[in-house]
Image (tube, coloured by chain):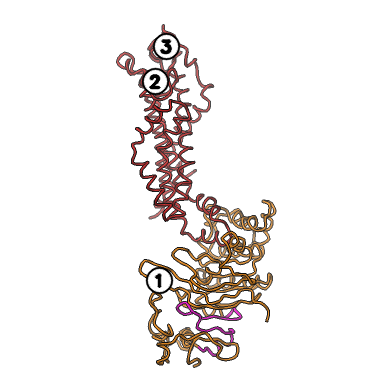
Chain colours: A orange, B red
Amino acid sequence: MERPLLEVKNLKVQFKLKHGTLTAVDNLSLIIRESETLGIVGETGCGKSVTGLSILRLVPSPPGQVAYGEILFEGEDLLRKSEGEMQKIRGRKISMIFQEPMTSLNPSFTVGEQIAECYRIHLGHSRKGARESTENILKAVRIPSPKFLMACYPYELSGGMRQRVMIAMALACGPKLLIADEPTTALDVTIQAEILELLEELQKRIKMAMIFISHNLGVVARLCNRIAVMYAGSIVELAETSALFAHPLHPYTIGLHNAIPSRALRNEQLRVIPGSVCDLMDPPSGCKFHPRCFKTKEICKTKVPHLEEKISERLAACYFPGE
Amino acid sequence: MGVVFRNRLAALGFLIVLLVSVTAAFAPLLTTHDAFQMDLTKRLTGPSLTHVLGTDMYGRDTFTRIVLGSRIAMQVALGAVLLAVAIGVPLGAVSGYIGGYVDTVTMRFIDALLAFPGRLLAIAMVAALGASFFTLYVAIGINAVPGYARVVRGAVLSQKEKEYVEAARMTGESEFQILFFQILPNCIAPILILVTLDFAHAILLESSLSFLGLGFPPPAPSWGLMLSEARGYMELAPHVTIFPGLAISFSILGFNLLGDGLRDVFDPRQYEG
């Protein structure tokens, strides 16, 4: 098997707070192959974003710290790199786009200056060369009149436009991996569709891999080859998109699945998962999902299930997988 | 800039500041007499056509001396404020950005500086080192350092949590680049307000020092010195003290009005409701 582009092994990220230690990501392993799209889904606070940030080593520290694990990118452990080496990787080889396009651009500079900055930092372009490259990348993200837009300040743009600019910035130096942290959450549904389409197209064109973080199963289903479902800092299920939707294995995935509102069931109540997300400072023993699970047995309360292959190519962290 | 002019007082302040600055810049072209030429036959004459603002006790033309005096006032104020910005801004920025012990130590140092009576410090410094442009810059500027350090620290603290900082980090910028080229440009507004207000303070402090005889020695046409020299003749010829006094008040008023106007403009709260 060829070497994966990114391999995360047993990652554990903790936040040391005044009143205890919060484990945001616990024993997480995943691999991303070249030009594939991996979706990470899960509810708020389950560690999706922290996983993305720790790949770029951008977890705010203190209080956050990677307690354990390896993050191998092109065979090299990112956790062992110096800050200077990481700065060369960020934006050049691994890029990230954020949830909040409204505030992710610096209000004091024009859009053109901000994108050009990427070229000048990483590729050493001259002022003029950077301007040309900026114009090209803006065309690539389908901005109608790039010259005009480059002279605009962020407050003059709509949310969708700003997200395009953020994407342009992230893709400026042709990264190998793009981490998209809920890039469409703050946008209208129609703009969402446009941005997703754009990401899909650009990804094919520059052949990069993508980690798509979202809490929207529909969006992920459309975009991703494989999906990892996270709960309370760990991956509970990892499978090909079609398989995951056809036959979810983990009870949490099944619960998520049932909770998607559908037109056929419009007179029924929404089938929610009982209870709420566990306290990450003091997680339940055994399987973290057991207090909310519909098939909890004794073993679930005492022993932590590991992510294992249950059926061919399908991983789940559960003693009783399947419907 | 248009917004500044909608505020009438700020516009007035701006005009005064402009007038004082232009006067200082082109002083030699505006004078009508020699500022140092004494003429004892024309002591303490009132305003007339040849001497617009009259003459002082040595028969020197008051208008000329006030015009030249604006140079001293503005130059000292400019030097002092630039020095304060050059020290205070990086200090506050680094302190706020790094936080932790660095922040605590820097801010306690700033507090100590703030606790020291500024005027006294300036008097002590000028008395010890003698009056020159440089000692006046330092003596006056050092008093303004804590203001910049605190204001910039506060602004950096609020800016550094914004998403664009995270985004800049994502594009691989170094911490130095982020602090000085991403965050600091967003802290310009409070710095600008403080600069304007500190100009007024600096002019006043320079005049006070000169008045106490600690500024430039006579016959320098410093406004404070002119006041001090003429105060013995106040009953005989009040105009000799009134005009330099007016020059001081007028310039300070201008800077204060402009500063207050800028604060109103930059304060986003005024756009609400």
Q: Work out which quarter of the rendered image holds the C terminus of chain B and state it.
A: bottom left
Comparing marks 1 and 3, which lies closer to the viewer?
Answer: 1
Specify the subunit that label 3 lies on.
B
Helix, strand or loop for disc 3: loop
Q: Are marks 1 and 2 on the same chain?
A: no
Instruction: Tell whether position A226 is magenta.
Output: yes
Is mark 2 in CB contact (under 8 Å) with mark 3?
A: no
* Foreground of the two, A102 or B175: B175
* Up/down of B227 relative to B157, above or below: above
**C-alpha separation, residue under disc 1 versus residue under disc 2:** 68 Å
Helix, strand or loop for disc 1: strand
Inspect this view and state whether residue A183 appears.
no
Which residue shows up at 47% across the image and 12% down it? B37
Specify the subunit that label 1 lies on.
A
Helix, strand or loop for disc 2: helix
Mark 3 Cα shell of 10 Å, populated few (<14), some (14-19), many (≥20) = many
Q: Which residue is mark 1?
A: A21
Q: What amino acid does circle 3 point to?
A: Gly
Which region shows up in magenta? A221-249
Q: What amino acid does circle 2 point to?
A: Met
Q: Which residue is mark 2?
A: B226
Is mark 1 in CB contact (under 8 Å) with mark 3?
A: no
Q: What amino acid does circle 1 point to?
A: Thr
* Foreground of the two, A187 or A21: A21
Q: Which residue is mark 3?
A: B59
Comparing marks 2 and 3, which lies closer to the viewer?
Answer: 2
A231 horizontally vs A38: left or right: left
